[in-house]
Image (cartoon, rainbow, N blue to C red):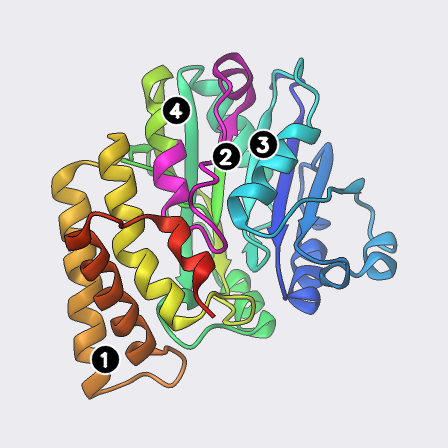
């Protein structure tokens, strides 16, 4: 094993209690993080008293609201000379206790790896969400699932648990695209594809965890629906997303929202998303489609 530092970065908004539970899980790591950087969208999003009781070195970073702004603020807080790793965790991602040790082993074995994501054992983002108790029960019965599988190539890292090699970030000045505001959907794709010019992107089943998919702190249905069209279009124009992927992504979103208005899930604002889709398609036809347009919505 090398002695390179491993940092953790968490951008958070509106999930004070969930964030505290996530930090408790980080304190259980068999390979402790060298430092944890938390960037709350508002001061009340971080419980400093609860965090102070944990055996973790934590620094709070200030930033304007928005996933990309907050993650860039974390990158700006890191020492530029550190040839280390930064793991971006969502504020509701519970890693298994072995997660950081497995990250270290993966990057030690593959010096050409620049981005990596682990196996999500359960993803509450695809349903009503998972409670911390649900997540811990899943972790408790995880066993050695997938531990013997070699790393597999990925098109992009998954933002809820994504490790980046800092020497590449620093050398090429790579940052998250702040033209993707607020929830910043697909920011992980954009950053991953720019990193891909300098090495491999892989997924490893040895790094495992549970994504609670908390519904607190999410963008409105209208804004998110607009982003479902505007963000793939933006990445397509930047050439950080292939045309076929952008088209399929947008088409799937519209189809899911149409179907959802017939049989709506109580945890998703399908009508709002579909209306956002319609506004984005209108703006596409008018030549004014841009992700930042959602900042003008009420």
Q: Is residue 85 above or below residue 11?
A: above
Q: Is residue 169 magenta?
A: yes
The crowd level at tag 3 (other Cα within 10 Å; few <14, some 14-19, many 20+) is many
Q: Which residue is mark 4?
A: 195
* Front residue of 100 and 238: 238
Q: Is residue 263 above or below residue 128?
A: below
Q: Which residue is mark 2?
A: 163
The answer to whether residue 145 is seen in the rendering is no
Rendered image: mark on residue 260: 1
Residue drawn at x 14%, y 39% is: 243
Label 3 – label 4 distance at C-alpha: 14 Å
The residue mark sitting in front, 4 or 2, is 4
- Mark 2 or mark 3: which comes first in sequence? 3
Stretch of the chain drawn in magenta: 163-191
The residue mark sitting in front, 2 or 1, is 1
* Front residue of 173 and 287: 287
Residue drawn at x 71%, y 61% is: 45
- Mark 2 or mark 1: which comes first in sequence? 2
Q: Are marks 4 and 1 in contact (CB under 8 Å)?
A: no
- Mark 4 or mark 1: which comes first in sequence? 4
């Amino acid at each position: 094993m090398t002695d390179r530092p491993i940092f953790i970065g968490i951008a958070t908004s509106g999930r004070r209690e969930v964030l505290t539970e996530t930090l408790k899980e980080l304190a259980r790591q068999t390979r402790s993080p060298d430092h944890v950087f938390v960037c709350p969208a508002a001061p009340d999003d971080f419980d400093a008293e609860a965090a102070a009781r944990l055996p973790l070195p934590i620094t709070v970073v200030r930033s304007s609201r928005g996933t990309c702004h907050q993650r860039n603020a974390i990158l700006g807080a890191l020492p530029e000379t550190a040839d280390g790793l930064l793991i971006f965790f969502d504020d509701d991602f519970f890693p298994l206790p072995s997660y950081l040790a497995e990250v270290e082993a993966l990057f030690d074995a593959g010096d050409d790896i620049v981005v990596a994501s682990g196996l999500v054992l359960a993803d509450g983002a695809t349903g009503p969400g998972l409670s911390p108790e649900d997540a811990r029960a899943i972790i408790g019965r995880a066993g050695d699932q997938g531990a013997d599988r070699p790393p597999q190539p990925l098109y992009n890292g998954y933002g809820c648990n994504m490790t980046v090699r800092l020497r590449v970030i620093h050398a090429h000045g790579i940052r998250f695209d702040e033209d993707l505001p607020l929830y910043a959907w697909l920011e992980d794709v954009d950053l991953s594809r720019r990193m891909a010019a300098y090495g491999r992107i892989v997924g490893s089943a040895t790094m495992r965890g549970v994504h609670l998919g908390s519904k607190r702190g999410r963008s409105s249905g209208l804004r998110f629906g607009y982003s479902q069209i505007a963000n793939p279009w933006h990445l397509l124009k930047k050439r950080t997303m292939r045309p076929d992927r952008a088209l399929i992504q947008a088409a799937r979103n519209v189809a899911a929202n149409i179907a959802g208005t017939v049989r709506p899930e109580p945890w998703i604002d399908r009508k709002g998303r579909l209306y956002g889709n319609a506004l984005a398609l209108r703006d596409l036809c008018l030549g004014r489609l841009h992700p930042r347009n959602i900042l003008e919505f009420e």
